[in-house]
Image (cartoon, rainbow, N blue to C red):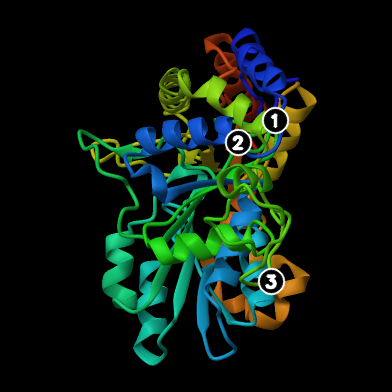
Amino acid sequence: MINLFKPNVDIDDALIHYKETLESGWFGRGNMNNKFEELLSNFLGVKKDQVHTVSSCTDAIFAICDSLSLMESDIVIVPTNSFPSVPTAVLASGAKLEILDIDISTGNICINELEKFCKNQTPSAIFVTDYGGIPVDVKKLKKVVGKNCLILVDAAASLGTSLVNNTSYIHKSADFVCYSFDAMKLITTGEGGAAVIKNKKLMQKFKEFTYLGLPARSKSGLDVAKSKGLAGWWEYDITCLGRRAVMSNLAASLGVSQMKGINKKLKIRSKNRKLYESSLASLEDIKFISQSVKKYNYSNYFCTIYSSRRDDLALYLLENGVYSSFRYWPINKISFFKDFCKDNDYPNSNFMAYNALNLPIHDSLNGKDIKKITSLIIEFYKTNEKNQTIRE
C-alpha cells in the first residue's frame, strides 16, 4: 500500500542522538530541546529566543489562546479549512468565534469574505491556516484586518515553505506561528510542535502557560541549591493557571537528527509535485491547487487536486493499493460547530469538500511510486468514461 503519509527517518543518525540523550540521564526538557530550537531558528531565519518547542502543535494553539487572555467581547476569525484544534481553542478561551469561507485556488482564507466582514465588525485576532504548506499572505491580511488585530498562523504543514531568493522569515509580520512535528509531518518527533513568537512578553507568558504556570526564568531545584547554598530550594510559585505541554529531550533528539536532511526532503517532494503535474496535464478533469513557484518554495505537504469524480477516483486508487484522502473536513460540516455557521455562506468550502483529493507526495516515495499513481489515475479516466456531476 502506498500511504498518503510516511515518515522518512535516518535510523542510524537518530540512534546516535537518542544514545546521547539516554546517556545524559535527563529525558525531560533539556539540552536537545535547545539544540533543536537553535536548528529550527536557523532554518526559519528567526532569533533563537523567538522559538519554543512544545508537546504538540495543538498544545501551542491552546496555549496562545490562553496567553492572549481573550474575552467574550473579542472576535476571532477562523477559516473553514482549519483543523478542529483552532476553533476549539478559540471557544475554550471564551472568545467569540467567526468562521469565514476559503479561496478554492489556494485552500486558504478568502480575502474578499474577510474584507466584507471587516467593513462591519472589528476582529481582535485572526487565526489562519497555511493549507498544505501554501502560505497565507500575512501582509495582505494585515491591510484588511488593521494593525490592532493579532495575526495567528497555523503553519503545521508549511515548515520548508519559503520565499524564493529571500532569506527573510515567511511569516515575519505574524504575531504567532505554530509548527507540527507529529508522525506525518516533514520533520517528526513522534508528537511535538513549536511556536514562533516575536513579542518577548507574550513568549514569556506562553512558556509559563505550557509549563504549569511556573515562571519562565525560574531555575531548577538543583541549580537553586548550588547557587544559594541554602535549604528551601524546593519552594516555588506560579504566575498563572497553566498546563504541562513540554517537548522531551527524547523527542527533540529525533527532531535534531532530521534537520540536516530537511532540504533533501523538500527537493524530493518538489520533484514529486512536478511529476504529478507533467503526467496528468492531459486530463481536463484534473486541476491542481495552484502554486506561485516564482515567489515561493513550497513544503508540498499536500498535493491537492480537484476532480468532478473525486469519490470514485479515491476508491479506485484504494482498490489498487494507493491511499489518498481529503484534509481537512471543513469546520462548517462538523456538527459541533454548526451553531457558528450558516452553510450557505461557504460555497467554496463546500466545493472543496466534495471535489478535492490529496495524493501521496511524501519524501519516502520514488519515481516508480509516482508513475504507478499517475498511471492508475489515467487508467481510471480511460476505463470510466461516464461523467459525474460536480457536487457543490
Which image quarter holds the C terminus? bottom right
Type of amino acid under label 2: Gly
Q: Is residue 284 left or right of residue 112?
A: right
In the rendered image, the residue lying farthest to the left is: 165
Q: Nearer the viewer, residue 164 or 47?
A: 47
Q: Nearer the viewer, residue 15 or 293?
A: 15
Residue at point 56%, 35% (across, down)? 33
Residue denoted by label 3: 241
In the foreground, 39 or 124:
39
- Residue picked out by circle 2: 30
Gap between marks 2 and 3, in whole Å? 23 Å
Q: Mark 3 packing: few (<14 Cα in 10 Å), some, or many (20+)?
A: few
For residue 317, side relative to residue 168 (left or right): right
Labels 1 and 3: the sequence-earlier one: 1
| 131 up-or-down from 277: above or below | below
CA separation, marks 1 and 3? 26 Å
How far apart, in angstroms, are the residues tagged by discs 2 and 1?
A: 7 Å
- Residue 337 at what x, y percent from top left? 71, 74
Could you tell which of marks 2 and 3 lies nearer the N-terminus?
Answer: 2
Residue at 70% over, 44% down: 311
Label 1: few (<14), some or many (≥20) within 10 Å? some
Q: Which residue is mark 1?
A: 26
Give x and y (percent) for residue 118: 37, 83
Regarding mark 2 in the picture, which secondary structure is present there? Answer: loop
State left or right for residue 145 relative to residue 59: left
Pointers 2 and 1 in contact (C-beta within 8 Å): yes
Q: Quadrant of residue 347?
A: bottom right
Quadrant in which residue 92 is drawn: bottom right
Residue 255 seen from this side? yes
